[in-house]
Image (cartoon, rainbow, N blue to C red):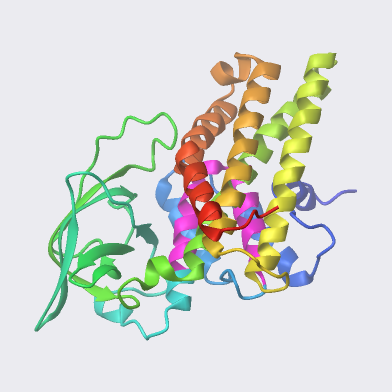
Amino acid sequence: MTDPSTTVLEHLTVVLDPSRRDDERTRRLATVARVPTMSGDVMESLAWAAEVGRSTPAPGTGQTLELWELLASTAAADVGVARVLEPHLDALAILAHVPDEVDLRSIGADETSTWGVFAAEGPGVRLEAQEGVDGWRLTGVKPWCSLAATLSHALVTAWTVDGRRLFAVDLRAPGVRPDDGPWVARGFPEIVSAPVRLDGAAAVPVGGPGWYLDRPGFAWGGIGVAACWWGGAVGLARELYAATARREPDQLTLAHLGAVDIALTSARTTLVEASRVVDGTADAEVAPGVLARRVRGAVARTVEETVQRCSHALGPGPMTADEAYARRLADLQLYVRQHHAERDDASLGRDLVARGTAPW
């Protein structure tokens, strides 16, 4: 008789490279069998993310593939939970890579802390950092701060006289006021992304001026987000495949299924190869930022094709009568818009031209 927990695990986990298996990897992926759902309390998802983060490897340490498998597996189970987990793990990876010791105790951070990474800029707003006799203080407005009213801590970029710099801040401390909106999104309704207003909030520097954006890990974190997108697309594709068992598929449905398989497999291969570059087991002839934009672009196109083909094949039924499917679809469509489409393509093209030789 099949162990029910094994059946659940096989359904939930996503393995990018089946040729690589070990006990530690299996144990880590087993945590996905306990993924909460975003239809419940968001605090449950945050607590789960904090637990998972205590044993998850950082990218570039030889286990990047395992990290991305965890993110993809979580998104395949629930895109919203992956949206909570990914920035928390990214923050922990940033703190693990910082060259200098960071005094997190002074802002009340410990292993139970839940983290966000707030690095977006917006028109008409600016967050500035100044150093005084009592340390660094942040003043101004930071836009697009997901879950700022719920998280305990965040890594935040702010402007100094030497340029942009990263700081750690206690989101519950005096001088920190998260807005509650506007947030009218149908995707990620519980994951409010709104401005945070800071008025002399105490902060701890993380790395020197420019370190956060210049380090290779900035690009690696961007690929981790793409792993979540890919996992979310896998979840949709599973629904398309399941539909073929409920009703005899016609040629159009089979064509959509085959095309989705090609797209997902191609993007998976791209992620696997990128993980080898990040871990140094494959030669990298391009800058980390170029690698990241290639991978993110490839995965974003896969997501968009999967969304379109699943919608064409399945019609409006699951969008209107299946809560889990409708939520997944809305979450994934919003999540993938972190890829800036043609603007990111243009940025990649600009760097390729600047290189001076064709990359193919």
- Left or right placement of residue 278 versus residue 88 in this view: right
The residue furthest front is 356
Picture coordinates of residue 50 (x, y %)?
47, 64
Q: Can residue 39 be seen by looking at this rendering?
A: no
The residue that appears at 66% across and 70% down in the rendered structure is 63
Magenta-tinted stretch: 63-92
The residue that appears at 44% across and 55% down in the rendered structure is 46
**SS assignment for the magenta stretch, majority:** helix
Placement of 310 over or under 31, stated as above or below? above
Q: What is the tally of numbered marks visible in this picture?
A: 0
Query: For residue 130, what is the image quadrant?
Result: bottom left
Picture coordinates of residue 218 (x, y %)?
47, 64
Inspect the magenta stretch and tell me whether residue 338 lies in it.
no
Q: Can residue 123 be seen by looking at this rendering?
A: yes
The residue that appears at 70% across and 46% down in the rendered structure is 267
The residue that appears at 73% across and 69% down in the rendered structure is 282
The residue furthest right is 1
Inspect the magenta stretch and tell me whether residue 80 lies in it.
yes
Picture coordinates of residue 106 (x, y %)?
25, 80
Query: Foreground residue, 228 or 217?
Result: 217
Picture coordinates of residue 299 (x, y %)?
62, 44
Query: Foreground residue, 310 or 294?
Result: 294
- Left or right placement of residue 164 versus residue 73 in this view: left
- Left or right placement of residue 222 versus residue 256 in this view: left
Query: For residue 98, what is the image quadrant?
Result: bottom left
